[in-house]
Structure formats: structure tokens, C-alpha cells
């Protein structure tokens, strides 16, 4: 077992915020791009370097018709690591679950989309890595200041 097999990145269970959309077929592509923008805006607000990967169909699997992976930069690993995934499943899930809407004339299958907005442990790791100073403190991203009770930097406890 190595450093990347345990800890904040590789866990069996994790908390996350998932965005889910049920929509009409004609709105599916528009909402998929909106979900991607939500992820990009979130990482920009935090100041974490990232890139978007348009996943090729051979790597997607059967559920999604289009998928983006959002990878954030890990200074420790000196590479980008996957932190978010944004999928347009079109009517695949709705067909299996028989989820429909009535458009005034007939019942139609909804399109489903999902976006892993924040995997909390991975995001915590990226904040610690990207904002750690040479002195060992961690600068708190400005976007989080309103939630930190006035704290703008994490400092090690002094030894007693």
C-alpha cells in the first residue's frame, strides 16, 4: 500500500454534493454545459487550478452519452487529478426507471444529468495542498472567509 491508496483521496465512502437535473430532451445539452460551468465557477472562486477533459466515448461506459471530468492540480503529485464528473445520461436512466413527463400531447422520457460538484475530502486535500505556505500555514481561500468565523489562515498549534 502506498501513499495514494489511503487517506483523503482514496476512501471507500465519501460525502459529496451531487447536482441532478431531470429535463426535456431539447434542454439536455444546454443543462449539461450549465453543470460544467457550475463546477468551473466553483473551482475559480476557490482559486484552485483545474482543467476540463471531454471524456471519449470509449471511456464513458453505457450510461452517459457525454461526460466531462474536471481535474484539479495537486502540487504534491505534480499532476492533475480527477475531482468532479459531469455526465449527460440522456434517456438511459429514465428508460430503465420509466420516468416520463407529459408535454400536452404525449408522455416522453426525461433526460437525466448529474454532476459531482464537490467530493468533500478531495476538495479539503486540494485546498490544503494548493494554499499551504512555506511556513506550514494554510491560507484560506477568500471565497470561504464568510464561513470561517474570521479565520483567514490555518496555523499549527503551538507545543505546550
Image (spheres, rainbow, N blue to C red):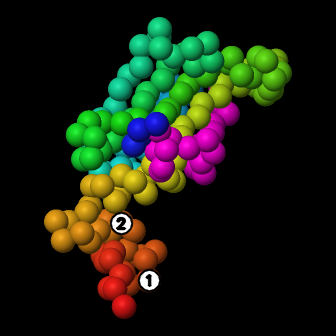
Q: Quadrant of residue 77?
A: top left
Kindly tell me whether residue 83 is visible in this rendering: no
Regarding mark 1 in the picture, which secondary structure is present there?
loop
Task: Please name which of the two marks, 1 or 2, marks the residue nearer to the observer.
Answer: 1
* Crowdedness near tag 1: few (<14), some (14–19) or many (≥20) residues, C-alpha within 10 Å: few
* Up-down relation of residue 65 to residue 113 (above or below): above
Q: Which residues are magenta?
A: 5-24
Residue in the image at 51% along x and 53% along y: 120
Q: Earlier in the sequence, mark 1 or mark 2?
A: 2
State how many labels appear: 2
Left or right of 24, for residue 118: left
Q: Which of the two residues, 160 or 65, is positioned nearer the viewer here?
A: 160
Residue 123, label in figure: none
Q: Are the two marked residues, 1 and 2, in contact with CB atoms closer than 8 angstroms?
A: no
> Residue 138 in the image: x percent, y percent?
29, 68
Direction left: furthest residue: 134
* Up-down relation of residue 95 to residue 53 (above or below): above
> Residue 95 in the image: x percent, y percent?
76, 17
> Residue 89 in the image: x percent, y percent?
61, 22
> Mark 1 to mark 2: distance in Å?
13 Å
Direction bottom: furthest residue: 160
Q: Which of the two residues, 62 or 103, is positioned nearer the viewer here?
A: 62
Regarding mark 2 in the picture, which secondary structure is present there?
helix
Q: Which of the two residues, 111 or 52, is positioned nearer the viewer here?
A: 52
Q: Which residue is mark 2?
A: 143
Residue 149, label in figure: 1
Amino acid at each position: 500500500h502506498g501513499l495514494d491508496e489511503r487517506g483523503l483521496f482514496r476512501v471507500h465512502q465519501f460525502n459529496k454534493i451531487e447536482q441532478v437535473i431531470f429535463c426535456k430532451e431539447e434542454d439536455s445539452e444546454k443543462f449539461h454545459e450549465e453543470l460544467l460551468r457550475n463546477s468551473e465557477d466553483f473551482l475559480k472562486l476557490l482559486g484552485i487550478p483545474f482543467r476540463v477533459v471531454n471524456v471519449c466515448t470509449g471511456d464513458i461506459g453505457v450510461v452517459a452519452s457525454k461526460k466531462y471530468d474536471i481535474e484539479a492540480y495537486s502540487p504534491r503529485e505534480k499532476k492533475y487529478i480527477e475531482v468532479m464528473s459531469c455526465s449527460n445520461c440522456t434517456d438511459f436512466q429514465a428508460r430503465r426507471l420509466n420516468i416520463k413527463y407529459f408535454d400536452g400531447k404525449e408522455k416522453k422520457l426525461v433526460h437525466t444529468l448529474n454532476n459531482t460538484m464537490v467530493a468533500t475530502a478531495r476538495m479539503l486535500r486540494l485546498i490544503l495542498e494548493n494554499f499551504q505556505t512555506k511556513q506550514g500555514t494554510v491560507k484560506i481561500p477568500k471565497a470561504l472567509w464568510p464561513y470561517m468565523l474570521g479565520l483567514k489562515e490555518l496555523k499549527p498549534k503551538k507545543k505546550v
